[in-house]
Image: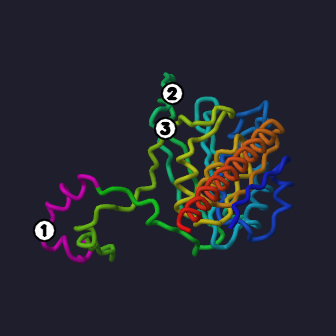
Amino acid sequence: MEIKTNIYLGDSKEELKKLSDNSIDLIVTSPPYADQRKNTYGGIRHEKYVEWFLPISEQLIRVLKPSGTFILNIKEKVVKGERSTYVMELIIAMRKQGWIWTEEFIWHKKNSYPGKWPNRFRDSWERLLQFNKSKRFNMYQDEVMVPMGDWAKTRLKKLSDTDKIRDNSKVGSGFGKNISNWLKRDKAYPTNVLYLATECNNKNHSAAFPEELPEWFIKLFTKENDVVLDPFMGSGTTLSVASKMKRNSVGIDIVPEYYKMVKKQIKETELYLCETKAKYEKTKNKRRSKIR
């Protein structure tokens, strides 16, 4: 099946209306944070942020499949010496809108910029909020498993015999454990903290995130030929990664420069794929001729 990438130029809350109901498997995006990117996205004030975002999230919940997931990369800012509450207010407002706030992942920036402030330390993490429209959604956990490492050698070898079988909780919570399931495994499920650098290959956007970020969530929540949406596509990182992973994608941005840049990237990718396919077919035909 041919993989498609569609992009739209314009305001997300309007351009999203062109998409069909229940047509998207995964939304991964990083909208402009409050009071940031003023020259490109208008610099939405933190006290107006929820009001600005809700018409967009109303369209997102419409286009997302019941089995789909929405990952929102966002972070509070400091206003007059204290953290703004606009992210928490947005979460509450989106829940009232019908979203289920399923999980919160943390992106730990391993190489965040150093600095000094009188009342706080440097930011080295951002939120990745997971929203769903149903409690039953697609999730392919085995795709993001990580090596067990030395944990299995150190922690598991100290377990008593009772620890190695299903055992009732000692605190009376009613939850048990069955550590024996992990004794012979070389991989484990990850935590909800992602350790990624801030560096990315795409330098054409003021806030482009690393490719590993959308890649991880695309692995976790989609399979090949699914559809990934980024309503604030910027330099097109999410779309590029989706295409490489054989997912269809849709991107929207209000900035003409980004639209033109991504459109050019798509044409270059399509040309490369056509040339690669032609070379493959040519090689295959030569082999057939030799066999004959």
Closer mark to the observer between disc 3 and disc 2: 3
Tell me the amino acid under the disc marked 3: Ala
- Secondary structure under tag 3 reads loop
The numbered mark, 1 or 3, whose residue comes first in the sequence reads: 1
Assess disc 3: are there few (<14), some (14-19) or many (≥20) residues with their C-alpha within 10 Å of its C-alpha. Answer: some
Tell me the residue at 30%/57% (across/down): 148
Q: What's the distance in space between the residues labelled 2 and 1, CA to CA? A: 45 Å
Q: Is residue 113 magenta?
A: no
Q: Is residue 241 left or right of residue 191?
A: right
The numbered mark, 2 or 1, whose residue comes first in the sequence reads: 2
Tell me the residue at 44%/44% (across/down): 195
Q: Position of residue 151 (x, y in %)?
A: 25, 55
Residue at which label 1 appears:
160
Assess disc 1: are there few (<14), some (14-19) or many (≥20) residues with their C-alpha within 10 Å of its C-alpha. Answer: few
Image height check: is 221 above or below 161? above
Q: Is residue 254 left or right of residue 72?
A: right
Quadrant location of residue 39?
top right
Q: Is residue 247 left or right of residue 125?
A: right
Tell me the amino acid under the disc marked 2: Tyr
Q: Nearer the viewer, residue 130 or 223?
A: 223
Residue at which label 2 appears:
113
Tell me the amino acid under the disc marked 1: Ser
Q: Which residues are magenta?
A: 149-170
The numbered mark, 3 or 2, whose residue comes first in the sequence reads: 2
Closer mark to the observer between disc 1 and disc 3: 3
Residue at which label 3 appears:
197
Tell me the residue at 49%/32% (across/down): 112
Quadrant the C terminus occupies: bottom right
Assess disc 2: are there few (<14), some (14-19) or many (≥20) residues with their C-alpha within 10 Å of its C-alpha. Answer: few
Rendered image coloring scheme = rainbow
Q: Is residue 160 magenta?
A: yes
Quadrant location of residue 44?
top right
